[in-house]
Amino acid sequence: MPAKYDTILVLDFGGQYCHLIGRRIREHGVYSEIVPHDISPQEVAALSEKFNVKGLILSGGPSSVYEPNAPKLHPHILEVNLPILGLCYGHQLLAQLVSGKVEPATCKEYGIAQVDIDKPVGILEGLSMKEQVWMSHGDTVMAPPPEFETLAHTDNCPVAAFRHKTKPIYGLQWHPEVIHTEHGMRMLQNFIFQVCKAQANWQMEDLITKMVKEIQTETAGSRAIIGLSGGIDSSVATALAAKALGEKLTAVYVDHGFMREGETEAIREAFEKFDIRFIVADAQERFMNKLRGVTEPETKRKIMGEEFIRVFEEIASDSGAEYLIQGTIYPDRIESGFRKNSDKIKSHHNVAGLPEKIKFRKILEPLRDLYKDEVRKVARMLELPKEIVNRQPFPGPGLAVRIIGPLTDEKVKIAKKSDRIVREEIEQCEFADGLWQYFSVVTDTKATGVKGDARAYGYVVAVRAMESREAMTASFAKLPYAVLEKISTRITNEIPQVTRVVYDVTHKPPATIEWE
Ligand code: XMP
């Protein structure tokens, strides 16, 4: 383990992809930390005591540089004399700071764009004359700042990439961190290794030791409980906490009635082997009593967040636990709007869905800085069984966020049956391994059908299957028609209340993976 890791700091301007930048850097074995957007040169110097800071990346963000309260760079940030890369909003701010010409675009660009590379040098070294990139911007840099040169342009964006003529300062209007930028990894590699000259000396193994130590230090000999939802995150958090606390840990699986068929049995089998206390809390009735008839997605999430905590509190008071451990990961926190410049997308049950007053001393979130694929890596390093490592992500509120409109007992039954059919059919074909998630959604729409020569009027069920690397962006899976046909036939035959099955062909963004 080196005394200090080579580190790239990512200045957080609130963009949905900010943490993806950090993630991509770590994928190259170089440590990254997300820091506030207005970090000063003195604060960067202070961080250098802990890390070997090799460069700064300014993230994108939802603001326009013209908004009165738009987040700004520290006015002296360029005095750090480190390589700097501005992305999207960061690119515009950098241009503005050094007197470039930034204007609101006449034509906004969102999504995939073709960019002409005028000079394939520095961060753009090794690229072709035309590149596919992911754009998402309103403001545009119209002319390069003095002492800077243009490296690339698009039809709508005359300065899509620039660099300082003598210093290692770069700006890109697009997002190299998003997989739709075809050679985005190459661009980031060029910045990390050629421009910043960083060494790949960061290891995931060190992180496990750090997380286990952190749980031990924080709990200081007290007891803790952890919520197990059945998904990969809480399973890995439980394994880590078990390593740190042993029998001082109580793992609670709350059966709130919105679990997939067979889930409770599978979790029981996997976790009863661990050297910890394991409890299945049967809370089906109390959850349904609170949720029956509730329609609004955020209200569902808030009610569930509150009810989870109340169940945990009751069990904690029996077991003497003072701390609650959760499997929250980075994207949960990002989308719940925990940063000052970012928009809230949805309240993930274990973050923004929590009630304000809780009886625990503290909530610990050992995986809070990790992305899903990093969590799977940790799972493999902890030698967890294959069934846990390969589990589909499953939201804490379970099928409740896959039932649109009022929650009713009938819709819950339909959700469970259709989810089982989707899983059975997809897992039989070779595609399952490449998929991030696959499930059904019971919509709040009814449609006319004909069953057994008679008119039928029933629910529309949607099927969703997604490919993704870390859930921040995702593409709908191009499942073969034969598989979709089998799913559709089985759902309409085996569930009498369903008359129609549709396939969701929306990427994330603009949709999210779950429907609520
Ligand atoms: P979205 O729907 O935000 O989902 O695109 C991204 C990933 O997060 C999962 N998800 C949740 N996980 N609690 C969780 O533990 C939640 O409240 C929650 N909501 C969504 C979702 O299944 C997907 O993998």
Image: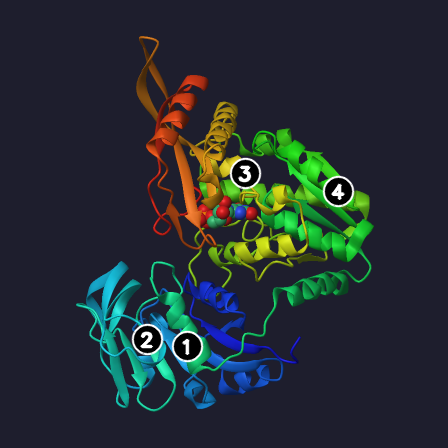
Left or right, 147 with respect to 188, comes to left
Q: Are marks 1 and 4 in contact (CB under 8 Å)?
A: no
> Which SS class for mark 3?
helix
Image quarter of the N terminus? bottom right
Look at mark 3 in the image and give the residue it sits on: 398
- The residue that label 4 is drawn on is 315
For label 4, the SS is: helix
Which residue occupies the foreground of this view, 337 or 7? Answer: 7
Q: Residues within 10 Å of mark 3 (few under 14, many from 20)?
A: many
| N-terminal-most mark, 1 or 2 | 2
Closer to viewer: mark 3 or mark 1: 1
Position above or below: 109 against 408:
below
Sequence-first tag of 1 and 4: 1
Instruction: Say which label, 3 or 4, has the lower sequence index.
Output: 4
The three-letter amino acid code for the residue at tag 1 is: Phe
Q: Is residue 28 above or below residue 243?
A: below
User: Which residue is found at the position 70% from the left and 48% from the top?
Assistant: 226
Q: Residue at x 81, y 45 (%)?
A: 319
Displayed quadrant of residue 295: top left
Residue 261 shows up from this direction: yes
Of labels 1 and 4, the one closer to you: 1
**Three-letter code, disc 2:** Leu
Answer with the quarter of the image where residue 472 lies. bottom left
Ligand 1 within 8 Å, label 3 CB? no
Q: Considering only order in the chain, which callout, 1 or 3, is on the residue closer to the N terminus?
A: 1
Counting other residues with Cα less than 10 Å from the Cα at mark 4, is it few (<14), some (14-19), or many (20 or more)?
A: some
Q: CA distance from mark 2 to mark 3?
A: 44 Å
